[in-house]
Image: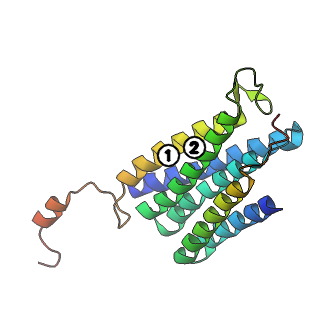
Amino acid sequence: MEFTALFLAVTVVMVVAWWGTRALALALFAATLLASIATYLHHASDVLKLSF
Amino acid sequence: MPRSLALTLNALGLYAIALVLAVAFAAQLLLDELPCPLCLLQRIQFAMLAVGPILNVRFGPRPSHYAVSLLAAIAGAALATRQILLHIMPGDPGYGSALLGYHYYSWAFIGFALAIIALAACCCSTNSSGTTASRSPAARLRAPPCGR
């Protein structure tokens, strides 16, 4: 679910980068980058069942 | 670097990122290669890598735009490194099938590393006003002021 939200967030950042203001695009990029890092840290200790 | 060349390289970079994501989704949907959370995060970083070139094409090349993509590339390389290290033990078959001898996360690391090198080079050849840094500040000081 959170990965779907992240993909949608990146889509919004790209749309804003093309159609919106530069400052808003940079702010949304920073927020999305932090969200993706937070998602990684949230799952960092998970067992990757698909990997083994 | 001339502005037209920079814009062309940024557009080509966008096509390259689109190709990488298309290959990843094609492998998932056509070959049933289900992505793990780390694979998804690497795809997200590849998509975020495109924000810098989009800003460059829209507003003109600036070092801050390259820095945006550089941050995404560093995060993506860190995630790919994490996944490589998960499968580094001898006897581990790795996750998913290999493409030309390397798994997808290894290719992702190579892609992010190349992106970091390219972005650093582009950042060095673009000044803060978005134009080519061919004239040194000293040369600009020696030039006669406009309007005289």
* Image quadrant where residue A35 sits: bottom right
- The chain to which mark 1 is attached is B
Q: Residue at x 57, y 77 (%)?
A: A24
Q: Residue at x 35, y 65 (%)?
A: B128
x then y, percent, for residue B63: 41, 60
Q: Residues within 10 Å of mark 2 (few under 14, many from 20)?
A: many
Relative to residue B118, is residue B23 drawn left or right?
right
For badge 2, the amino acid type reads Phe
Relative to residue B81, is residue B131 drawn left or right?
left
Q: Say what secondary structure mark 2 lies in.
A: helix
Q: Nearer the viewer, residue A45 or A29?
A: A45
Kindly check if marks 2 and 1 are in contact, taking CB atoms under 8 A apart as contact: yes
Relative to residue A39, is residue B55 drawn left or right?
left
Q: How many marks?
A: 2
- The chain to which mark 2 is attached is B
x then y, percent, for residue A28: 61, 72
In the picture, the disc for residue B112 is 2
In the picture, the disc for residue B116 is 1
x then y, percent, for residue B130: 38, 64
